[in-house]
Amino acid sequence: MLITIIEKNMAQMKNNIKVLRAEKGITQEELADKVNVTRQTIIAIEKNKYIPSLELAYKISLFFNKKIEEIFKYS
């Protein structure tokens, strides 16, 4: 039951990291290196399969010089 609730919540979290990466002209690997995670983590976040921790969301927002809520949308 708990897994179902988490999966429903994950489907509602969206982000625009792929667009921001394209604007900066960086790869998933480069972003991963900058925020100290694996490329697979960035892939999962971009596909909305993984919700990052607050710490990771903060690192990503600092890298892109955006507010967390400008990158991650919950609906």
Image: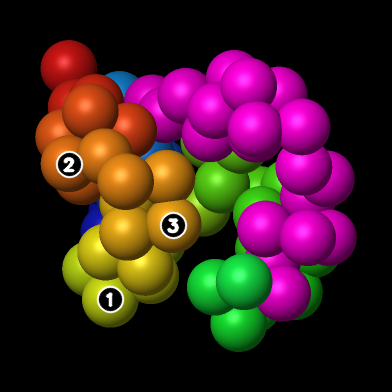
Q: What residue does disc 3 label?
A: 63
CB contact under 8 Å: marks 3 and 1: no
Tag 1: amino acid: Glu
Q: In this view of the protein, which residue sits in the foreground, 28 or 23? A: 23
Residue segment shown in magenta: 13-33
Instruction: Compute the Cα span from label 3 to label 1.
Output: 12 Å
Q: Position of residue 75 (x, y in %)?
A: 17, 17
State which quadrant residue 37 falls in. Answer: bottom right
Residue name at image x 54 percent, y 73 percent = 35
Question: Residue 53, position in %: x, y?
Answer: 32, 70
Disc 1 crowd rating (10 Å Cα; few below 14, some 14-19, many 20+) is: few
Q: Which mark is residue 20?
A: none
* Residue where numbered disc 2 is placed: 67
Query: Is residue 31 left or right of 72 when viewed as pictured?
Result: right
**Distance between mark 1 and mark 2 Cα atoms:** 13 Å
User: At numbered mark 1, what does the secondary structure look like: helix, strand or loop?
Assistant: helix
Q: Callout 2, which amino acid?
A: Lys
Is 11 displayed left or right of 66 in the figure?
right
Q: How crowded is the residue under tag 3: few (<14 C-alpha within 10 Å), some, or many (20+)?
A: few
